[in-house]
Image (cartoon, rainbow, N blue to C red):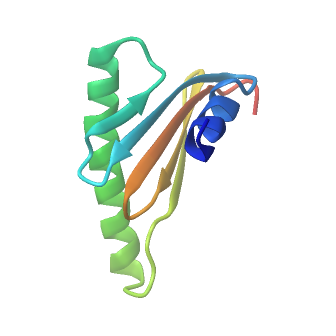
């Protein structure tokens, strides 16, 4: 098993994790642990838009900086978004666990 697979399995089996989605640099879903394809597509679209907006605002405040991580709590869920040049990792977890 590759290091990526091991890491993905470790994350998705953590207490409270409801889903993991990995997006390519252009926002296309590469891997998803979410069975609902429509929800994965919606999450990819909205997540890509959110990342773009956050990066824009961070660069507006400081041209030498960039957004690398976003954490959003919404209702009973928390969205953790790790941003990289090659991919974006989105983790959905139960907000009561954290």
Residue lying farthest to the bottom in this orientation: 64
Question: Residue at left 30%, top 46%?
Answer: 48
Left or right of 17 in this view: 56: left
The residue under the point 42% across, 49% down is 88
In the displayed structure, does residue 24 sit left or right of residue 66?
left
Q: Quadrant of residue 11?
A: top right
- Above/below status of 78 relative to 23: above
**x and y, in percent, of residue 84 in the image:** 44, 61
Locate the C terminus and report the quarter of the image it occupies.
top right
- The percent coordinates of residue 70 (x first, y second) are 51, 52
Number of numbered labels in the structure image: 0
Which percent across, then down, holds residue 89? Answer: 47, 45
Residue at the limit of the structure toward the front, as seen here: 1
Question: Residue visible at 30% across and 16% down?
Answer: 37
Q: Position of residue 5 (x, y in %)?
A: 57, 36
Name the quadrant containing residue 8: top right
Q: Is residue 15 left or right of residue 67?
A: right
Residue at 70% from the left image edge and 22% from the top image edge: 16
Quadrant into which the N terminus falls: top right
The single residue placed furthest to the top in the displayed view is 35
**The quadrant where residue 2 appears:** top right
């Amino acid at each position: 098993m590759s290091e990526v697979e091991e890491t993905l399995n470790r994350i998705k089996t953590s207490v409270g994790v409801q889903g993991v989605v990995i997006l390519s640099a252009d926002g296309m879903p590469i891997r998803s642990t979410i069975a609902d394809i429509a929800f994965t597509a919606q999450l990819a679209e909205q997540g890509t838009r959110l990342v773009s907006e956050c990066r824009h605002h961070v660069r507006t405040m400081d041209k030498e900086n960039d957004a690398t991580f976003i954490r959003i709590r919404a209702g009973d869920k928390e969205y953790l978004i790790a941003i990289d040049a090659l991919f974006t990792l989105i983790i959905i977890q139960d907000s009561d666990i954290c």
